[in-house]
Image: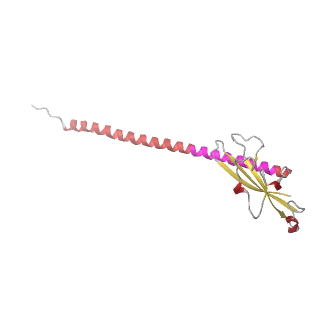
Amino acid sequence: MSARTSPAKASAASQRGAVLFVSLIFLLVLTLIAVMLARTQTTEVRLAQNDANHDMAIEAAGAALRFAEMNIAEGTYVAFSQNNAGLYTLNPAAGSVYAGINWSSGSQVLTYTGPTLASIPAAPEFFVEQMPSVAMPGTSLGACQQGYGANGCVQVFAVTARATGGNQTATATLRSIYERE
């Protein structure tokens, strides 16, 4: 008598191998999904850090602008005719000095010396340009052209500040126009 295997036993033996193969494929797909999610999370963390670093640079440059405007209001900056050390008089024919500023040169810019800015390793820098005065209503235009801050004229200043963020990979440059009567 020969031994015969029943069809149910033969089918069960071949299905055991199929279950192992399907399980391995399923495990591989889950592993790939987990790796992709981990990489996405790492990228999002880097983006958030870069955004926070840039925000710190903007805040530091804004602090330098307000510091310069405060000094203008108090009359601290007066040596504009020398056109150096961060204080310049606009030459309408040549335009703004902004394009020619060397931010790494201490002789061309001023350094923020106000309250300490947390997490900012380097103090922001800025320069001030004295613009032509503006005539107030009822004031002769000729009076303002005779000199800066003539009676009835408003002095106008352009302040440009540059700062770096917490890890110095992000920079921000801000500019404001400040008027003083």
Question: What secondary structure predominates along the stretch shown in magenta?
Answer: helix
Foreground residue among 149 and 55 = 149
The answer to whether 32 appears left or right of 101 in the picture is left
Judge whether residue 54 is colored magenta: yes
Q: Residue furthest right?
A: 151
Q: Is residue 88 above or below residue 41?
A: below
Foreground residue among 94 and 17 = 94
Q: Is residue 91 above or below residue 78?
A: below
Res 140 quadrant in image: bottom right
Res 151 quadrant in image: bottom right
Judge whether residue 68 is colored magenta: yes
Res 26 quadrant in image: top left
Could you say where residue 139 lies in the image, as x and y percent from the top left? Answer: 88, 67
Foreground residue among 14 and 111 = 111
Colouring method of the image:
secondary structure
The answer to whether 20 appears left or right of 34 in the picture is left
The answer to whether 52 appears left or right of 67 in the picture is left
Identify the residue shown where x is 28% and y is 37%: 17
Identify the residue shown where x is 32% and y is 39%: 21
Q: Please state the extent of the stretch shown in magenta in the rendering.
A: 46-70
Could you say where residue 154 lies in the image, as x and y percent from the top left? Answer: 85, 60
Could you say where residue 172 lies in the image, as x and y percent from the top left? Answer: 67, 50
How many numbered badges does the structure rendering display? 0
Quarter of the picture containing the C terminus is bottom right
Quarter of the picture containing the N terminus is top left
The answer to whether 107 appears left or right of 14 in the picture is right
Could you say where residue 97 lies in the image, as x and y percent from the top left? Answer: 73, 57
